[in-house]
Amino acid sequence: MKKTSPEVLPAEGGLGNEPLLAVDNLHVEFRTRAGVVHAVNGVTYSLNPGETLAVLGESGSGKSVTAQAIMGILDMPPAVIPKGEIRFRGTDLLKLSEDARSQVRGQRIAMVFQDALSSLNPVFTVGWQISEMFRVHRGMGKKEALTKAVELMDRVRIPAARQRVNDYPHQFSGGMRQRIMIAMSIALDPEVLIADEPTTALDVTVQAQIMELLAELQRESNMGLILITHDLGVVADVADKIAVMYGGRIVENAPVHDIYKTPAHPYTKGLLESIPRVDQKGQDLYAIKGMPPNLLDMPTGCAFHPRCPYRQDICVTEAPALSGISGTRSSACHYWREVLDGTHE
Ligand SMILES: Nc1ncnc2c1ncn2[C@@H]1O[C@H](COP(=O)(O)OP(=O)(O)OP(=O)(O)O)[C@@H](O)[C@H]1O
Ligand SMILES: [Mg+2]
């Protein structure tokens, strides 16, 4: 194995005052022929051991690009990171050598990908694919690695793991294949797991089971978990806190219960009002009016202003900073007080 300077790798001991993972004012652009795509425009969020952060936002809001930046798997170019820090145990990953970074990627910070179901290789058995993690990263022999694969399949509650270890991906249901992907992601005991829309392709019952599995695995290992989703309903029961993204920025940060009861950003409020509720059957479903912002030509001021029922002149000219509204909450809205009160003109 190539040598790396040990001083640049994030420490493994106590955390002091540092969060486990802190994304700080992160910007990511894609320089394309059509122009500069402003995909991430100052994202700030943090995660502690044992904590679950849900990152919520509609399609194209920059959730996956932020995750790819944390993992260090963006293609650069076209991607450029002009500003920001991603601190893992206090060390800015963006300043590490590729060599040091690759020792963090997949091993200490792991990810379950958005297109997980298609990322299993159809020509290898699932046991072979899971045990590859141990062969490649831990230098285990075939037999030992396969034993570990069966253990992991048990851990992600795949029934009859020992009998099924030599089956191929197509012999498993969608939910079971997702469990296999999760098994691979936790194989090396990561300190942070990022799950990018882990349940999008699954039916509602299986979605709930996968969420429960992630929560259980987290309780067993105390890892920090980032759950990316565009569905507020899916994460309500498992998340501790929520970061809401709009146009590549965090517009609201809050403990999960506060956000459901009293959203402090008009976009969050719109998202909550657009969730179907069984107690309001037959009523029209609210939809946030207008279109997501054009990332090639962002609106001036607050990116949400063209769609916002609270809009005033200042919203068109001045982008509101994400600022604290209480010890645990922050909102990027000039009129967060009015939103909290539920009033608007
Ligand atoms: N390689 C790329 N080149 C140009 N633009 C890109 C590239 N990758 C992503 N983008 C753009 O960056 C923006 C943010 O994308 P991202 O994948 O983070 O969205 P998302 O919030 O994960 O959405 P979804 O819910 O659909 O997964 C999108 O507008 C996307 O088109
Ligand atoms: Mg995505």
Image (cartoon, rainbow, N blue to C red):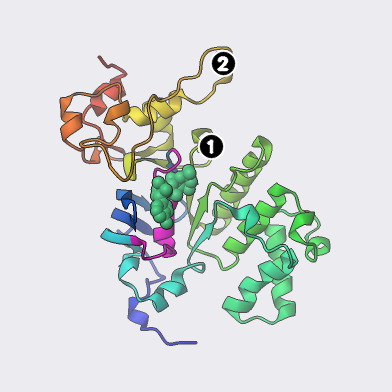
Residue shown at 34%/73% (left/top)? 96
Task: Kindly identify the amino acid type of the residue bearing the numbered disc 2.
Answer: Asp
Q: Position of residue 119 (x, y in %)?
A: 62, 59
Q: Position of residue 333 (x, y in %)?
A: 25, 32
Position of 129 with respect to 264 (left or right) is right
Task: Kindly identify the amino acid type of the residue bearing the numbered disc 1.
Answer: Asp
**Along the viewing direction, whichever of 187 and 124 lies nearer the viewer:** 124
Position of 232 with respect to 6 (left or right) is right
Is residue 64 highlighted in magenta?
Answer: yes
Is residue 202 highlighted in magenta?
Answer: no
Whichever of labels 1 and 2 marks the residue nearer the N terminus, that label is 1
Residue shown at 45%/51% (left/top)? 64
Q: Quadrant of residue 170?
A: bottom right
The residue at label 1 has a CB less than 8 Å from ligand 1: no
Q: Residues within 10 Å of mark 1 (few under 14, many from 20)?
A: some
- The residue pinned by badge 1 equals 237
- The residue pinned by badge 2 equals 279
Q: Report the residue that reaches farthest toward the right.
A: 163
SS of the residue under disc 2: helix
SS of the residue under disc 1: loop
State which region is magenta.
58-79
Position of 68 with respect to 280 (left or right) is left
